[in-house]
Image: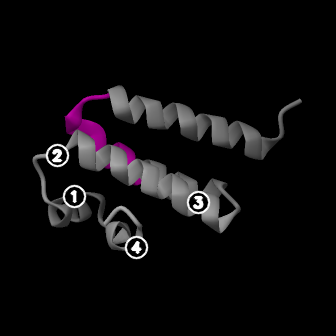
Amino acid sequence: MVCRIGRDLVALGIEAVKLIIGPEETAASKAKELIQKAKENIPEPIAQNDFVEFIERILIYKLSNLTLEELEAMIGATEFKETRFY
């Protein structure tokens, strides 16, 4: 039997794939939702930061025509400046 945390992590991974293949129009809201879910469901801070950075990278590549400032405004956060990617 898979524990609740394991199921939550699998669900986050599936949602990340949906972000990659989904439409650009919903990418920012989906990314914001995934970042919030990661903060709620990933107990280890390093793993949580890695997942958030992964989501941000997806968003940066998916919406490459936008600046980092515009992306930050879209997801309502300043996480981009807190990651190694920035």
Q: What stretch is highlighted in magenta?
A: 22-32
Q: Which mark is residue 71?
A: 1
Give the CA separation, mark 2 to mark 4: 19 Å
Residue identified by numbered label 2: 64
Mark 3 and mark 4 residues within 8 Å of each other at the beta carbon: no
Q: Is mark 1 on a helix, strand or loop?
A: helix
Q: What residue type is labelled 2?
A: Ser
The disc, 2 or 3, on the residue closer to the chain's N-terminal end is 3
Q: Which label sits in the foreground, 4 or 1?
A: 4
Near mark 3 (Cα within 10 A), the count class, few <14, some 14-19 or many ≥20, is some
Query: Where is residue 32 shown, x and y percent of the image?
Result: 38, 53
Q: Where is residue 66 in the image (x, y as percent from the top left)?
A: 12, 53
Mark 4 or mark 1: whose residue is earlier in sequence: 1
- Which of 1/84 is in front? 84
Name which of mark 1 and mark 2 comes first in the sequence: 2
Give the mark, 2 or 4, whose residue is nearer the N terminus: 2
In the structure shown, which secondary structural element does the residue marked by tag 4 occupy?
helix
